[in-house]
Amino acid sequence: MNVLDIDPKQIARARELAGKVTDDVQAFIDKHTTVSVERSVLRLFGVDGAHKAPGVEIPLVNVVVEAVTKAGKLGLGVSTILAAAIKAAGPDAEPQEVCEKIAQGKIAIEDLPSVTPAEVEKLLAVRADSAIQRLDLCRRKKADKLSTYGDPAKPYKYLIVATGNIFEDVIQARAAVDAGADIIAVIRSTAQSLLDYVPIGTTTTGFGGTWATRENFRVMRNALDEEEKARDKYIRLTNYSSGLCMSEIAVLAALEDLDCLLNDSMYGILFRDINMKRTFIDQYFSRLVCATSGIMIQTGEDNYLTTAESLGAFHQVVASQFINESFAKKATLPDELIGLGHAYEMDPTRKNPFLLELGPALLVKECFPTNPLKYMPPTRHMTGDIFFGHVYDSFFSLVTVWAEQTTQLLGIPTEAIHTPFLQDRYLALGAAKYVHEAAADIAGEISFRKDGIIQNRARTVLAEAVQLLEEVERIGLMEAIAKARFADVKRAVNGGKGLDGVVPRDARYANPLLPRMVERGTANIGKRAPV
């Protein structure tokens, strides 16, 4: 039922424009690679661990990709170098062994024999197939859990842990699950997105969050697996696939069976000043990994409303959602794995803020009816008054259930004061549970006054989103970002961090994993993904 009386042609127009916008960027993506994409390829081929240099341990994949870059051959793809080394050493040589020898200086990249893309495919075919099978295993595990435990009722109650110590995070996560949480998100350590490598091992000293590492993923996944068995309930695990190691973290998350990843096509550009060319290339590869492994992405449009006021900027959120959706579909993600984000961030001192929030939330649901929407709580206007904050969050919970959102990141009454304690999360879960049950069927019971505040607000937002998309289609997405059309944040096309890691593909570029992931992701679209 179209409770907002929205013209479906406008929604179709927005989707058409977003497709044209992303077509232009995809043409650029298809002609380039990055150091992080190539490191991801090595990880999918099973390369892991650290190279020990004097006084330091460096991720082996970084050492190898840096060596290939210095040799001026990254444009060929790291797969080409692996294949050449295997051709020289014999068919039994393994990628891990080859990479260790490159790092030790025992294999000189310049001395390797040349190989054609056809030879790369032949030499790496079995290993590439095995890599795809590992990603498939991640998908099957999720499907098995849903078959065994069923799916928690929606909206999923999503809670964060952020102690900096993975072992303390486990304690808080178990307590949150005990109180009713459905999704645990491990917040990443401050500024990790700016590191051009993934730390190794378990960590206990993060700031504002916990380092995203493969071992930390494994520790939390194992703990939540134990909770699942004890409670006969599927518990999802989330982390952050963004920043300079966007695609690598997606690979590590898949290998360690994470369920969701914060993954946005523009977040790193706008909020971490990572070069836009680097980000667009990396997000494509990361999303191919997610599509193959059945990981739900969750986009970050909620962040726009922390830098721009919701009343005047919500159309930017909707325009970005259409762009994120289009990029995701180009990476073969089905609707059920494209989690689109937005937030309840209206200035509470304004008249009728609840109605002005409800209209856009319902609009997002109408534009993306089959997507797992992720709704974020108020943060910008939190004052430190915990009693007001609790009431504020309860209105957010009411919009969540009314607009039939899939995932609700629970608002914490102590937001803007400190990293939440266990008791803070307990209060948030209890309040959200009450609102969810008290208003469980409200969406089907209430209609809205024609041309009233709610309908007019939704229509205005959609019209402004279409207008913005028309401008972006005319000038190009990169130029639109340079002109601060999203989140009121301006970024230069060739500015930011990581541009030096972008490399044009050589005419002989080879990456046997890319066509396999596209083929597998496309084949999976017709099947219901494990949500």
Image (spheres, grey):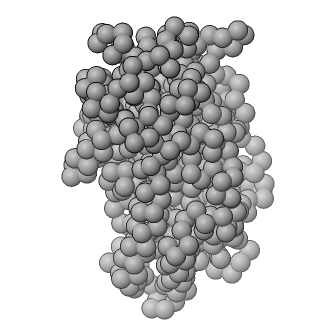
Residue closest to the eye, 421 or 268: 268
Question: Where in the figure is residue 369, as x and y percent of width and height?
Answer: 36, 66
Q: In the displayed structure, does residue 460 sit left or right of residue 505?
A: right
Q: Can the viewer see residue 162 in this picture? A: no
Q: Quadrant of the N terminus?
A: bottom left
Residue closest to the eye, 15 or 445: 15
Question: Where in the figure is residue 434, as x and y percent of width and height?
Answer: 51, 56
The image quarter containing residue 349 is bottom right
Q: Residue at x 34, y 26 (%)?
A: 115
Q: In the displayed structure, does residue 250 sit left or right of residue 415?
A: left
Q: Can the viewer see residue 80 in this picture? A: yes
Q: Residue at x 67, y 67 (%)?
A: 484
Q: Residue at x 78, y 54 (%)?
A: 384
Numbered circles on residues, count: 0
Q: Residue at x 43, y 73 (%)?
A: 17
The vertical placement of 500 against 411, above or below, is above
Question: Where in the figure is residue 219, as x and y percent of width and height?
Answer: 51, 22
Residue closest to the eye, 177 or 69: 69
The image quarter containing residue 350 is bottom right
